[in-house]
Amino acid sequence: MSYIPLLTKDEHIVITLKGPNVYERFDYEYINLDKRPLWGVLSASIAIRKIIRDKKIDIVHSHSYWTNIISRLATGKKPKLINNYHFADYETMKQKRAVKKMIFLDRITGRKTLIRVGVSQYVATILNNTFPGGDIRLIPNFIQCKKTDRIRNFARGRELKIVAVGNCNLEKNYGLVLQAFAALREEPISLDIFGGGDRLAFYRDEARRMALTKVRFCGIVPNAREHLINYDLFLSASISETFGLAVLEAMCAGLPLLISDIPAFNEIAPTGALFFNPYDKDNLVARLKEFLRNPRSSDLSVYDTILQKYSSKNYLAELTDLYNS
């Protein structure tokens, strides 16, 4: 949704397996196949093969596990085939039987002309380890945002307002966050969490059960980025990420960062970010108390350098080079 409208010199056809889809509101051709993995793989491949032939498609570019597999079954030798990887399961869950099957199918459907693209250096490294000798490229994700010129200065003695952004799933590690805030019950700290997800109701119930009145699961917040400037600190306790988009959003808002020590965050984090062990509740508690005692301000010039690196301009330049090579 972010990059296709920016490629104005190309003609795009967007195909999804299942609808309705937000792509329908854009000004290019959209096709919903109304198929579901796993049983719809072959029929979807046949349908896409016909589209490729009839529309004389030059490049096929897919962005999820099953659409990657289908794209290979649907294409012959002529269209350039690009598969993006937005997940780290081949590293974080490689011992699971289901993931081993995913890797096996990924390998046997691959071909010499296939280009695999990692959305971060972390993901590209996983791909190089999983598919040695394959054509692996790195095109990091990007962010489009309005950067603030306002430095956040938290004054000791008032309530520390913290924000977290991310859907309520296990990877976001909100269970540990609740444990930490239970230990900080008497401290002048509050937390708002933006994001929906299947576990939203569960975490709301947990916060009520633990009587954590200063932890609020806000659900889906429209235009969430615009609200970040109202906080003093950004928090992410994720145990697994492939890219730190929410971290970049916090940098756009000029917020100091308290983030988990994981590869995807280390890759993009600025000097001065506070890290903690996402498996150690006491480490998070200690970091929050440390910030209360010695608040940090953000270096907006450092933030600006990082945001330029992960800008849409750089992304489009690298993607265009890949398309045209």
Image (cartoon, grey):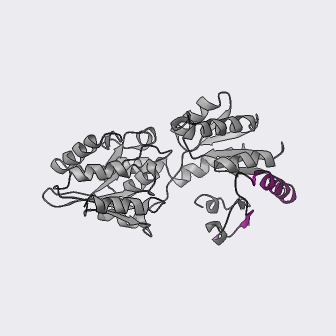
Q: 98 or 89: nearer the eye?
A: 98
Residue 48, position in %: x, y? Answer: 80, 55
Residue at the location (46% across, 52% down)?
Answer: 245
Residue at the location (64% across, 66% down)?
Answer: 23
Rendered view: 48 above or below 119: below
Q: Does residue 111 show up?
A: yes
Residue 12, position in %: x, y? Answer: 72, 60
Q: Residue 204 lies in what quarter of the image? A: bottom left
**Extreme residue toward the left, this view:** 157
Q: Quadrant of the C terminus?
A: top right
Q: Is residue 3 left or right of residue 244?
A: right
Q: Is residue 58 left or right of residue 287?
A: right
Q: Quadrant of the N terminus?
A: bottom right
Residue 121, position in %: x, y? Answer: 52, 38
Q: How many marks?
A: 0
Q: Which residues are magenta?
A: 26-55
**Extreme residue toward the top, this view:** 133
Whether the magenta-drawn stretch holds residue 42 is answered as yes
Q: 281 or 266: nearer the eye?
A: 281
Q: Does residue 150 show up?
A: no
